[in-house]
Each structure stands twice: as C-alpha cells, then as structure tokens.
C-alpha cells in the first residue's frame, strides 16, 4: 500500500548514481530535492496515510451518514486515502477494507497507541499524536478522587445510548423526513 | 519520544528532513494538508532517529491553543463537564423520552460538520423545570424538561438539539478554557514522553484539568457564550436542520416561544443566551418566517407520545 507520494520519491531515488553515494553535499541536495518532489506529488495527488482519531468509527458504502456500513475502524488504525468528496474520504484499511468515512474521524497525524515502544519510528513529533497523553483516564480518576461530590454514573449511562443507522433510517421514514445532503430547502 | 542510537551515516537524512519540514510549514499551514510523516514515512520509518531535545520543543511549540486538544482529551473534558452539570441538575430516568431524544439527536449530529467525535454524541433529559440546555465538549448534550416543554413540535426540539450540537461541532466549550491553563498543560504534556505520569505530574495535570472544567462549566451555567458564538451555533443549526429535512424555520418558532416564556433576569437561558429576539433577527434572513404548524401527523403523534409524561 504505497501512496503516490512515495512512488514519486522512489523514482527520484532510483536515479541516484551509486558512485556518488559518499559525496555528502550532493546526497544532501538530492535528498532535499527528493523530499520536496515527494511532498509536491503527495500534496498534488492528495494521497496519503491517515489515522482514525475516534474510539470507534464506521466505514460506509457511500459518502453519506445514511450509507450502509461496510465495517468498523478503531482508534489509531492507519488508513490510506483513495479519494475525497466534500467532507467525506474514501479509505482503504491494511486489511483491504474499503469505504467512506467523515473527515472529522481522521487525522493526518499518526496516532501512537503505546507511546514509548513505537515513538522512535515516527518522523516528527508534530506529526504524531500519543494516545493517552495529557488528559487521560488517570487524570479523570484523580479528578474523581479530588471531587467526591461529582458523580459520573449518569455520564457512563448516557454513553450507552446508541442509535443504529437502521434506527435512524426508520425514524426519518416514519416521520416523513427527507434528508437533503446538498442543503436544498 | 525516546532518544535512540544515532547512526552517523544518516545525518544528511536528518538535515534533509528538517529542511523539508521547514518547506512544509511554510507552504502548508492548514490542517487539511497531508501530514509530513505521511510523506517521509516511507523512508523515515525505520532509519530516521529523532533527537529527543528537538522533539520536546516541537510538542511544546505546537500545543498552544484549544485546537491542539486531541479528540481523546476533549472526550475526558466533556465527561467531567457533563458530570458537573449533573451534580447541579438531576438526570431524568425517563427511558422512553431518552430513547426518542437520542434517536432524534444522534440523527441530527450525523448531519453536522463534525459527526465523528471521540466518544460520539449522546443526549439526556434533565429533571428540571428551568428552560435550559447544555452541550459538553465531545458531544454529551443535556436538555431540561422545561426546555422540551417550550417545544411544540419535533421540528422545534430538533432546532434546540441542532443548536447544541453546533456548539460541540464548533468546539465552543473548549474555546472557553483560559489560554494560560492550556500553556501549562501542554508544557507538562510535552515534557513527558511516557503514557503514565509520575505523581507530581499527574497532580499538576489534574489541576489544569480541573481548572479547565471550571472554565467551561461556568460558561455553560453562568456566563454563557458570546453573541458571536451563539450566532454561529444558530447558523450551523439551520444547516443541520436543512440537511436532515426538518423545517429550519422551527428555530424561529422555538425562539419566539422562548421569548414569551423566559423571564427577564432569570437564572436560566435568559442569563446565558442573547435575547431570543436578537437571535431571531440574526437568522431570519437565512430561513424566512417559519410556521408553527406540525409538518406531518405521524411526526406530531410520536412527539406528543414521547413528551406526554414530562
């Protein structure tokens, strides 16, 4: 699963004469050129790897919130962009599952689920998001301890209120409500 | 970020990567651009050592506003804000209404500009006669019995929920966190690579967390958002209502009814929101007049059945 940008880079790399490998200056220039070209190609073709930034998400058969569900994705999953349409992105998972998901579920950062072990491999800290960093379940536990009067029971309960796509569709049908994604009146 | 063994042969790679990063940030400031790691990932994944010092600086420098709060952190903030509201307003265990409220609300949320938050949108009825509604970051939305009673149709209730969803989608709650707190938080976050914090850092982080919750909760329950943010939420609500297929004019109908029922100087919506009349003036050009007539018999029937015992 290699996005176009990487192909572009590989192409330039292949043109590198082997005997100049030792020459730092030239290598440097070629590398910079390579990166810039790769960047240009990647930006131009709007391809690239994205990460799922929500707890659980769903891939859909069409770019719409009523599109049938193809399969689940979860926090930290890396997906490859196939195409974009409005706020929706068609992606492919490493398991070759293909479907549409709203861009609000995705980040261009790499989400690292177990910071420590994998962080060495990331290219730049600005481009990774360490899961569980900052305000996390430990902070929440400490906050609860400090504020005994604040009860999370109903917060936990309301998070279990879930409505399926099928329930939404029949709710709209029964109420004679016709969605118009285009925003027409 | 752990320091790793530095292989001398890769210095040019590091240099090139830094230059590319510079290039990247000069030309690509928007958040929609493909990430740098996406582009260099193919070559850098296995070979590029990251100097620990510069990595730290990067984290601290990058985290400086509410926009840098990750969806996961927003989720924990939202849970605490909702828990705070629930410590002042009791939840209503009306299962029938809560199911109806969630079916309506989650459908509307799916049509917003941010349908996917970390933990999703969830709605709950509060057992209070006060006319009020609260949107905690991440999508926990609480609506009082008094507010539901103001609504005469499903479309009107949809308008209330769409307005609250818009506060979540626009991250308005997070905007009310004082910047000084965030600077503190991001310094602690940046200074520590590991997932688990030592007791001192945990206590510092919890203090910042606690302060942030206070900022948001007091905005929701006492001071209210700026008129600009309320206007944004009303505009976005109109968009959501249109997308789903509800009458956007229901927002005007609802505000007109609210104007009648809110007591000036009251401690509820009257205190935390602009005058309904001003809000009507702001959105009227977008939706026209609006009609109080129920859109369909079926819709009105189920609305009345769900709200019968409130």
Image (cartoon, coloured by chain):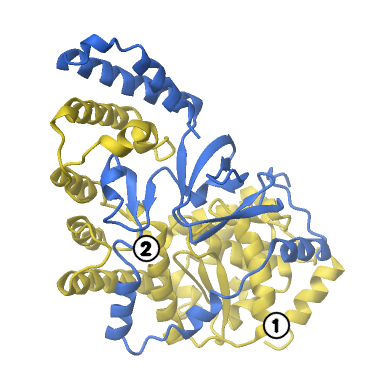
Check disc 1 and report its element: helix, strand or loop: helix
Relative vertical location of residue B148 with respect to residue A105 in this rendering, above or below:
below
Q: Colour of chain B?
A: yellow
Check disc 2 and report the residue beneath it: B73
> Do residues under tags 2 and 1 come within 8 Å of each other at their CB atoms?
no
Looking at the picture, how far across and down is residue A179, in whole percent? 74, 52
Residue furthest out toward the right: B297
Q: Is residue A77 left or right of residue B59?
A: right
Q: Are marks 2 and 1 on the same chain?
A: yes
The x and y percentages for residue A84 are 58, 36
In the rendered image, is residue B154 in sight? Answer: yes
Q: Residues within 10 Å of mark 2 (few under 14, many from 20)?
A: many
Mark 2: which secondary structure?
Answer: helix
User: Which label number is shown at residue A181?
Assistant: none
Residue depicted at x 18% and y 75%: B199
Percent x, y of residue A160: 57, 75
**The chain in blue:** A
Subunit bearing disc 1: B
Q: Chain of mark 2?
A: B
Name the residue located 79 percent from the left edge and 64 percent from the top edge.
Answer: A170
- Which residue reaches farthest front? A19
Q: What is the CA distance from the residue labelled 2 to the residue labelled 1?
A: 31 Å
Asked if residue B288 can be seen in this view, the reply is no
The residue beneath circle 1 is: B96
Residue occupying image coordinates x 68% and y 69%: B103
């Amino acid at each position: 699963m290699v996005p176009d940008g990487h192909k572009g880079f590989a192409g330039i790399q292949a043109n590198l004469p082997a005997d100049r490998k030792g020459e730092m200056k030239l290598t440097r220039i070629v590398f910079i050129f390579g990166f810039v070209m790769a960047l240009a190609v990647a930006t131009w073709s709007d391809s690239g790897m994205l990460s799922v930034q929500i707890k659980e998400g769903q891939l859909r058969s069409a770019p719409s919130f009523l599109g049938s569900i193809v399969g689940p994705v979860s926090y930290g999953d890396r997906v490859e962009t196939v195409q974009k349409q409005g706020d929706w992105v068609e992606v492919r998972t490493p398991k070759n599952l293909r479907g549409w998901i709203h861009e609000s579920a995705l980040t261009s950062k790499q989400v690292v689920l177990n910071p420590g072990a994998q962080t060495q491999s990331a290219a730049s800290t600005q481009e990774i998001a360490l899961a569980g960093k900052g305000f996390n379940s430990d902070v929440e536990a400490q906050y609860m301890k400090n504020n005994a009067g604040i009860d999370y029971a109903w917060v936990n309960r309301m998070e279990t209120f879930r409505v399926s796509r099928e329930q939404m569709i029949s709710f709209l049908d029964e109420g004679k409500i016709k969605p118009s994604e285009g925003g027409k009146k | 970020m752990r320091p790793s063994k530095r292989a001398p042969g890769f210095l040019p790679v590091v240099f090139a990567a830094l230059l590319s990063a510079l290039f990247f940030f000069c030309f690509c400031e928007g958040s929609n651009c493909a990430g740098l790691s996406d582009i260099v990932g193919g070559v850098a994944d296995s070979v590029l050592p990251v100097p620990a010092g510069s990595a730290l600086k990067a984290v601290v420098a990058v985290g400086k506003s509410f926009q840098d709060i990750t969806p996961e952190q927003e989720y924990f903030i939202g849970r605490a804000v909702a828990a705070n509201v629930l410590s002042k307003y009791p939840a209503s265990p009306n299962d029938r209404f809560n199911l109806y409220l969630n079916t309506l609300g989650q459908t509307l949320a799916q049509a917003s500009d941010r349908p996917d938050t970390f933990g999703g949108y969830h709605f709950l009825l509060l057992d209070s006669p006060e006319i009020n509604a609260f949107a905690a970051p991440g999508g926990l939305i609480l609506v009082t019995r008094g507010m539901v009673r103001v609504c005469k149709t499903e479309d009107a209730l949809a308008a209330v929920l769409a307005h609250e969803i818009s506060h979540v989608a626009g991250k308005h709650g997070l905007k009310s966190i004082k910047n000084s707190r965030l600077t503190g938080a991001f310094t602690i976050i940046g200074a520590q690579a590991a997932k688990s914090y030592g007791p001192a850092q945990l206590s510092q982080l919890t203090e910042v967390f606690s302060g942030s919750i206070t900022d948001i909760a007091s905005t929701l329950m006492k001071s209210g958002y700026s008129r600009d943010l309320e206007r944004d939420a009303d505009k976005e609500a109109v968009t959501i209502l249109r997308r789903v297929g509800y009458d956007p004019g229901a927002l005007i109908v609802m505000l007109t009814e609210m104007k009648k029922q809110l007591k000036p100087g009251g401690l509820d919506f009257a205190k935390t929101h602009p005058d309904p009349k001003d809000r009507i003036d702001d959105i009227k050009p977008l939706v026209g007049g609006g009609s109080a007539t129920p859109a369909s018999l079926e819709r009105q029937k189920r609305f009345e059945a769900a709200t019968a015992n409130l």
